[in-house]
Image: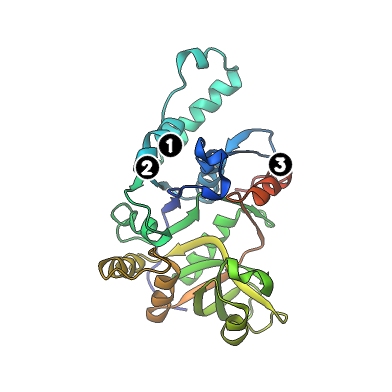
């Protein structure tokens, strides 16, 4: 692990520019990031607010949300707008206070746009001018997280980054019959740690045969692999690699992807894998959204 002047992670990027086709027909009228879930305090929140709070509660100072250009006003109105007068009059005093809280939260949010939907990597690249030359946290706009520790999952990654001062990818253990749905990583355990890995390969949705040959991780049971949790801290060099792919029109399944650029980044500098003590809930599928509704209600929010 490299020794250098400590750099802080101040900014988080949240990708929320997809179409939500897996949640059709509900997503025809409501952006999937605005589907509601109920937290442990009994407050009905849109998914995107829970993701923003994950970052802010971890110590992130500014949040950039990547959206489709036609959705900008929707996100701005939610986080930065005031309720209509007739709606305001119907609110209880506590709800009015909460409305002020949302606007305070909105002061730390910048809405960024992806003009054309050309993949996850392209969406991340759209944040480059806003992030500039800083390491940044990356979260998914339809994933919410539940920590097994006293601090939330995002804070865990920040604490790892503060120690290693290099890109960190949150990972989890996944059985082999599921890995074709996820980005997968290989690596070697860091000495005297049960949670850290020096990554050696990052591969998007491998077959089981490929994983058995190339993605084995010492210490894991047979047919158990490390897959990407949905939380990252990435050094800004990634934007140069994404730009190069876009410039040369390097696509995978018709889109610009992040995972292949992370592999290229890994070939240039070290990346740490962090086995997150916690769970990730994908609200972008009907069955996993339902699971989130049932289970997230009983999870106490961590700072």
User: 279 and 58: which one is in front?
Assistant: 279
Location of residue 127 by image quarter:
bottom left
Q: Earlier in the sequence, mark 3 or mark 2?
A: 2
Residue visible at 51% across and 47% down in the picture:
20
Q: Secondary structure at mark 2?
A: strand
Residue visible at 53% across and 41% down in the picture:
27
Q: Secondary structure at mark 1?
A: helix
Residue visible at 48% across and 71% down in the picture:
164
Q: Dot 3: within a 10 Å radius of its alpha carbon, few (fewer than 14), some, or many (20 or more) residues?
A: some
User: Residue 72 at x, y = what percent?
Assistant: 37, 38
- State the residue position of label 1: 75
In three-dimensional space, the C-alpha distance between marks 1 and 3, rounded to whole angstroms, equals 24 Å
- State the residue position of label 3: 297
* In-image side of 79 versus 197 (left or right): left
In three-dimensional space, the C-alpha distance between marks 3 and 2, rounded to whole angstroms, equals 28 Å
Location of residue 248 by image quarter:
bottom left
In the picture shown, does residue 58 fall above or below 7?
A: above
User: 215 and 162: which one is in front?
Assistant: 215
In the picture shown, does residue 11 fall above or below 176?
A: above
Name, please, the residue furthest toward the bottom: 213
User: Residue 31 at x, y = what percent?
Assistant: 50, 40
Name, please, the residue furthest toward the front: 25
Q: Of the numbered discs in the image, which one, if any, rests on residue 111? A: 2
In the picture shown, does residue 96 fall above or below 138?
A: above
* In-image side of 5 versus 291 (left or right): left
Residue visible at 61% across and 73% down in the picture:
226
Q: Of the numbered discs in the image, which one, if any, rests on residue 7? A: none
Q: Dot 2: within a 10 Å radius of its alpha carbon, few (fewer than 14), some, or many (20 or more) residues?
A: many
Q: Secondary structure at mark 3?
A: loop
Q: Earlier in the sequence, mark 2 or mark 1?
A: 1
């Amino acid at each position: 692990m490299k020794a250098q002047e400590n750099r802080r992670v101040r900014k988080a990027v949240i990708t929320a520019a997809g179409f939500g086709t897996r949640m059709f027909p509900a997503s025809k009228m409501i952006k999937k990031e605005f589907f509601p879930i109920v937290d442990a305090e009994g407050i009905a929140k849109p998914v995107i607010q829970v993701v923003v709070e994950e970052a802010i509660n971890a110590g992130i100072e500014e949040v950039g949300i990547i959206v489709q250009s036609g959705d900008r006003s929707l996100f701005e109105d939610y986080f930065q707008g005031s309720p209509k007068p007739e709606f305001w009059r119907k609110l209880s005093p506590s709800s009015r206070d909460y409305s002020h809280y949302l606007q305070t939260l909105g002061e730390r949010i910048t809405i960024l746009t992806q003009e054309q939907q050309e993949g996850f990597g392209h969406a991340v690249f759209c944040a480059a001018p806003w992030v500039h030359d800083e390491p940044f946290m990356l979260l998914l706009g339809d994933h919410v997280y539940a920590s097994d520790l006293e601090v939330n999952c995002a804070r865990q990654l920040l604490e790892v980054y503060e120690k290693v001062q290099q890109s960190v990818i949150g990972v989890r253990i996944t059985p082999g019959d599921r890995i074709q749905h996820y980005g997968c990583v290989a690596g070697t355990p860091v000495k005297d740690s049960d949670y850290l890995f020096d990554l050696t390969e990052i591969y998007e949705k491998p077959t089981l045969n490929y994983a058995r040959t190339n993605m084995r991780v010492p210490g894991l049971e047979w047919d158990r692999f490390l897959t990407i949790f949905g939380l990252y801290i990435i050094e800004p060099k990634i934007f140069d690699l994404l730009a190069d792919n876009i410039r040369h029109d390097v696509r995978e399944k018709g889109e610009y992807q992040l995972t292949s650029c992370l592999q290229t980044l890994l070939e240039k500098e070290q990346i740490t894998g962090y086995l997150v003590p916690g769970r990730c809930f994908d609200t972008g599928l009907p069955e996993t959204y339902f699971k989130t509704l049932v289970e997230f209600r009983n999870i106490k929010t961590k700072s």
